[in-house]
Amino acid sequence: MIPALPRRVRAVDTDRLLEPEQEAATCGFSQRLPVDWLQEHLAAEATHYLFPTLVHRLGHRPEVAPQWRCRLLLTVRTGEQVPGLLDVLPDTLDKVPETLDAMSEKDIVSRMEHAVTQREWAERMVAEGVHKEVPRN
């Protein structure tokens, strides 16, 4: 039986975010950002947010199913917040404590919906000459 999708925003620091991102890369999950890009562009001392939004089932890969598809709100080195997506194994997400109150969660979800996307931010950084290229997953 598939556990219920947790509908709570989780706050993580940069080091803690890199762990499920690396796991997603190792497992070949479709929704993730390259770990080297994150290491280069995330604000080192920032808090980032994961919000599970749907159950992603892989019938052809039962060893890594289900996954929770999480919306992300990432703080980059410019101080801006950009959204993203990350597929996370349920056991991995369970290790991240729920520490936010309802009002904080509502504010974070609103920021996820209105922020410039990670791709748009990366393209702008390239156009401004700050970075050389836009990352590919």
Image (spheres, grey):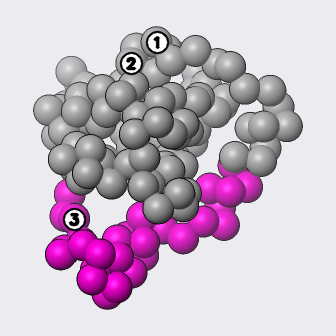
Residue for point 42% across, 76% down = 120
Q: Which residue: 18% across, 47% down? A: 36
Relative height, residue 22 to residue 41 (above, below): above
Three-letter code for the amino acid on which mark 1 is drawn: Lys
On the image, which quarter does residue 80 sit in? bottom right
Question: Sequence-wise, which precedes: disc 1 or disc 3?
Answer: 1
Per the image, the residue denoted by label 1 is 95
Number of the front mark, 1 or 3: 3
Measuring from the top left, give residue 90's x and y in whole percent.
Answer: 43, 20
Of callouts 2 and 3, which one flags the residue occurring earlier in the amino acid sequence?
2
What SS does tag 1 mark? loop
Residue 68, compared with residue 74, is above or below; it is above
Q: Amino acid at mark 3?
A: Pro
Q: Calculate the distance from the C-alpha at mark 2 to the C-alpha at mark 3.
A: 25 Å
Region of the chain picked out in magenta, as a range: 109-137
> Which residue corresponds to mark 2?
92
Disc 2 vs disc 3: which is toward the camera?
A: 3
Q: Residues within 10 Å of mark 1 (few under 14, many from 20)?
A: few
Q: Is residue 121 magenta?
A: yes
Q: CA distance from mark 1 to mark 3?
A: 28 Å
Question: How far across and down, in percent of the image, does residue 91 sit?
Answer: 40, 14
Along the line of sight, the residue nearer the viewer: 48 or 105: 48
Which residue sits at x=59%, y=29%?
Answer: 10
Left or right: residue 30 compared with residue 91? left
Q: Secondary structure at mark 3?
A: loop
Given residues 3 and 113, the one toward you in this image is: 113
Give the residue at mark 3.
135
In this rendered view, identify the residue nearer to me: 114 or 12. 12
Q: Looking at the rendering, in which quadrant would you find the C terminus?
A: bottom left
Mark 3 and mark 1 in contact (Cβ < 8 Å)? no
Which residue is at 47% across, 36% downward?
Answer: 45
Query: Is residue 15 among what the camera can see?
Result: yes
